[in-house]
Image (cartoon, helix red, strand yellow):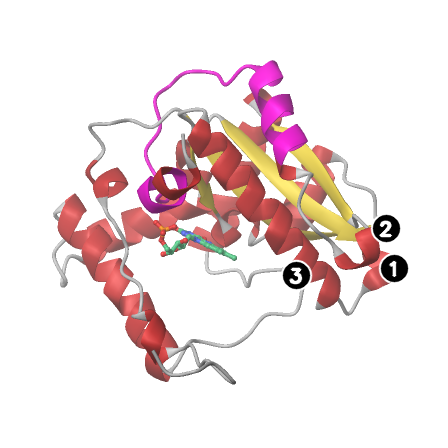
């Protein structure tokens, strides 16, 4: 796919066909993504690729703990609830997703079901858990590096007809992910990327989230006027 077509057609995928993604394809995706830039070429990342029984255990236990109202346990520091413009954008995409799925605003049961799907990594057949070397905490620069790798993974997957969603919910209980996937203590768990072949009949997969016009967040300094 050409670059323009790739970035403009990509969207998060939250409904997957029950079909395994071959290891060879995942390897290719990671080979592409690892060309991401990183601070001083430090490449502080690790990728733990989960499928089958370990992934089932992670999704079941993560969902059970969160559904029981236990607090999340993340390795990275996180912000509180979004407010202002950030909150408006969060609500905007949620409205789009709920409208696509036919979930009414006051339908608490279906809204909760949607949240639980997120904690289950949307039942994707594969999950890539991204970690970095903990010696780099408190992060920031290495978080940026992981973001570059992560977008590379998502785009390289999309280029191969594989859908993905970056899924903070899926590692809400990072302690469970660490235990099941046997992730060493000297790595901090950043996020996971749930992926698989898109279920074309799953309505939320068609949602194209909105973006603020570039003029609202870009300034040009020192350019001659057009
Ligand atoms: C760091 C990060 C964490 C995310 N966590 C979740 C998540 O837990 N659940 C979810 O449904 N989507 C999650 N997303 C996907 C965003 O909601 C999505 O990228 C955004 O709404 C823009 O939509 P698009 O990817 O379809 O363009 C996450 C994205 C990022 C970058």
Task: Kindly tell me whether mark 1's CB lies below 8 Å from ligand 1.
Answer: no
The percent position of residue 190, horizontal first and vertical second, equals 65, 54
Earlier in the chain: of badge 1 and badge 2, it is 1
Corner quadrant of residue 138:
bottom right
Front: mark 1 or 2: 1
What residue lies at 50% left-to-right and 40% top-to-bottom? 154
Residue 82 as seen in the image, left or right of residue 144: left
Q: Which mark is residue 186?
A: 2
Residue 211 as seen in the image, left or right of residue 106: right
Earlier in the chain: of badge 3 and badge 1, it is 1
Q: Nearer the viewer, residue 174 or 1?
A: 1
Identify the element where label 2 is drawn: loop
Corner quadrant of residue 78:
bottom right
Identify the element where label 1 is drawn: helix
Front: mark 2 or 3: 3
Residue 186 as seen in the image, left or right of residue 102: right
What residue lies at 56% left-to-right and 21% top-to-bottom? 52
Front: mark 3 or 1: 3
Q: Which mark is residue 144?
A: 3
- In this picture, which residue range is highlighted in magenta? 6-32
Q: Which mark is residue 135?
A: 1
Q: CA distance from mark 3 to mark 1?
A: 15 Å
Magenta-span inclusion, residue 29 = yes
């Amino acid at each position: 796919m050409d670059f323009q077509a790739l970035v403009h057609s990509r969207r998060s995928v939250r409904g997957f066909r029950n079909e395994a993604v071959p290891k060879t394809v995942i390897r290719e995706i990671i080979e592409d993504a690892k060309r991401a830039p990183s601070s001083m070429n430090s490449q502080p990342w690790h990728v733990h690729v989960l499928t089958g029984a370990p992934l089932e255990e992670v999704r079941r236990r993560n969902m059970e703990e969160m559904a029981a109202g236990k607090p999340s346990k993340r390795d990275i520091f996180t912000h509180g609830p979004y407010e202002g413009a950030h909150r408006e954008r969060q609500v905007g995409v949620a409205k789009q997703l709920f409208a696509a799925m036919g979930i009414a605003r006051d339908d608490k049961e279906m809204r909760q079901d949607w949240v639980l799907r997120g904690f289950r990594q949307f039942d994707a057949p594969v999950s890539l858990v991204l970690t970095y070397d903990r010696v780099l905490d408190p992060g920031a620069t290495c978080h940026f590096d992981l973001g570059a790798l992560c977008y590379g993974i998502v785009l390289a997957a999309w280029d191969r007809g594989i859908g993905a969603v970056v899924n903070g919910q899926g590692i809400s209980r990072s302690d469970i992910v660490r235990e099941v996937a046997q992730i060493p203590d000297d790595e901090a768990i950043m996020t996971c990327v749930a992926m698989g072949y898109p279920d074309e009949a799953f309505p939320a997969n068609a949602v194209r989230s909105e973006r603020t016009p570039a003029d609202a967040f870009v300034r040009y300094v020192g350019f001659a006027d057009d």
